[in-house]
Image: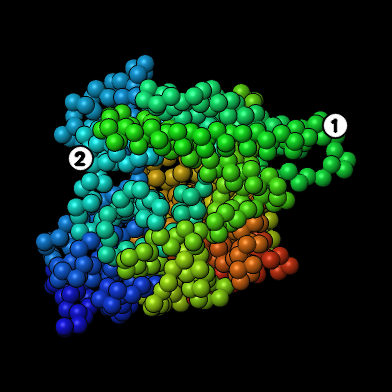
Amino acid sequence: MTKTDWATIFGPMQAHSGFAPRAQQTSMGQAVIDSISSKKNLIVEAPTGTGKSLGALIPVISAIKSKKIERAVVSTATKSLQDQYMGDLDTLLKVYKDFTYRSLKGRDNYLCFNALKQNSRGNKKMDGILRKLENSTGALGDGERGDVERVLRRELDDYEWSFMAGSSRRCGDNKCVRDECYSARARELAMGANIVITNNAVVRVDAETRTDDSMSEPFLGDVDVLIVDEAHELEDALIDGWTEEITEWELNDMAANVQTAVALAGEHMDSEGLGYRVEMAVSSIKDFLSSVIRFYSEYHSGTEWNQVTDALCMKFVRNGAHQSLIRAMEEYEEESGERLGYALEVMEEVDEYIGNVLKYMMEGAIKGTRKISKGRTSARTLMKTLSKVKEALDTRDGVIVSYGVPYSVLVTGIIRRSGEYASKISVVPMDISLKAQDIWKDRVSILMSATMRDLSTGDFRYIKTALGFEAHSEMVLDTVFDLAGKQVTYVTPGGAGGYSDIADIPGARYSRTELLDLIKAAKGRTLVLFTARRELDDAAEYLLQMKARGEFEYPVYVQTKDANKARLAENFKNDPHSVLLATKSFFQGFNAPGETLSLVVIVKYPLPQYNTLCKNRIQWWKGRGFPNWYESKSMEVYHQASGRLLRTESDYGVVALLDQRVTDVSQRVCQTALKAVRSLGSPVVRDVASVSAFLGT
């Protein structure tokens, strides 16, 4: 058999577009070809500018056309990258022809008429939207938010969209029909496509349906090749997806599902008073949540507990505690286990009872199983979560291990607008390597990203361990950019450079005048990245005041809480001397090549939030042989943020770090941040005059 080579399969694309193959893209493309041919997994670090999407897609298309494989899935971390892949496939279809492709996103990206019908009852505004959409189904395209907005001729805010979008909580059995739910339609179309462009959340759902005990068919169907782009994001996406949460309002929804299911099942088989026991079990769970609120709000002396996260456990010291705290602690310790134990027993009864009813109904071909099945799913969800919560109560740190997976069980305080206390209990997997192994079963898997190695050690050991991924081949490609000639890194001189006016807000470590001086030096053309919302708001207020005083004339775009990110990005890119203030959602996936962007400012070095969960993860990974986990995570984020600057070989500019902690060598963050700065491979300057000289301003 003749070996396929990159030059041959890239030839048609080169003839069509005039693109000259880059050495890095050639190396990567050939590695992907070899991986697919040999059916061996590959991991490749390919910096920005390599041409990863074409380097992955062209070998896949070649393998499909030569009948070596039938279907491939490409997973991305962001919707914008997903859309970019679809755009690349539009072009590639014109060149290579005779293959099919579809996009598949998470359920909440699609219109669901079932949801809209339910939520429009008694709501005149939603009812009007429902009627208009029902009369315009032919114009709704894929039923995504943008399609709906086009039909309605206006933008929807997140609250409005929540009334009409699909939801895994509302429909978790994947049995919606395409006429009512565009998510179901998208999945049906994707199942028949050669190439599916999806995201990490969908890959997680697919993994759940590929376990040995799953009763469902794989969500993505049979897949020969799986490619994960921006693979450094996959671990956190899986952790988020596999985190179990319970609040009073979520409990009410699940309890209603269970009670409805038991009542409907009772029409076919005697429930022997199970409905009453379900009510008592739900009451026990609510009593438990109330005792949690009483104890932790006393423990934190009231309002201090708002948005504070603690380990959920009962190993607290009583010495010196005041009487109200002792009383709350006694109730919490003495009754929590009993309350949860009773609830678990009842949910086990529900699971067994509904299982027998469903078996009876299926054998008799009796309709109406869906709501009953939904109730059983809710009962099982409660069982799974509450069993871990009960176990965590007997620990000192809320850390448990269940079926080989370590979890951090946490409680977060919430003070509602009414002043009432509430809480959220989260069961967070800290190491998903065992669960993730189902992703890689029976398929060739290729991981790629610009930042996948552990920057503290320079190897792939962490990501392979964290994802349970066996890499048969590893590749690290050099950047295509002249980092020494096209990029300068600016590090604040702090007070030594005259910048001692630290913003007067808690936690701030940057100088407002330094930020303004840099923006002036770049003549706008600046992306300013913040790790904290209050710092962004403070900078926005200051810059707008300075603009009003005539200090500069450049437009300032601000990412507010309800801002449309895509529209904000387009406004910035179309206004070549503007300034964009943005949060962590712009640290990656944002692409503004050319003269629009010459300066990326990172206001604070992006250390992971040092909370209870972070401390637990540090200890866990230290025990697995990764003592620099915390530093490595921060360096990864810093590299991603810095990577917003150079997007094409003609780009040039400055990456600036304003965090004044880097001027204090006694602080650990200083050592980590300066190591991250040096790893960019660019000359380092510490005065704004050098920035102006480099930018030619």
In this picture, residue 147 sits left or right of residue 504: left
**Amino acid type, mark 1:** Gln
Can you say whether 148 is above or below 410 in the image? above
Q: Residues within 10 Å of mark 1 (few under 14, many from 20)?
A: few
Q: Quadrant of the C terminus?
A: bottom left
**Amino acid type, mark 2:** Gly
Frontmost residue, 122 versus 583:
122
Disc 1 designates what residue?
A: 323
Is residue 420 visible in this depiction of the protein?
yes
Q: Residue at x 70, y 50 (%)?
A: 395
For this orientation, the residue located farthest to the bottom is 2
Frontmost residue, 195 versus 357:
357
Of label 1 and label 2, which has the lower sequence position?
2
Q: Residues within 10 Å of mark 2 (few under 14, many from 20)?
A: few
Q: Which mark is residue 166?
A: none
Q: Which mark is residue 141?
A: 2
Residue 548 point in image, percent of width and height: 51, 40
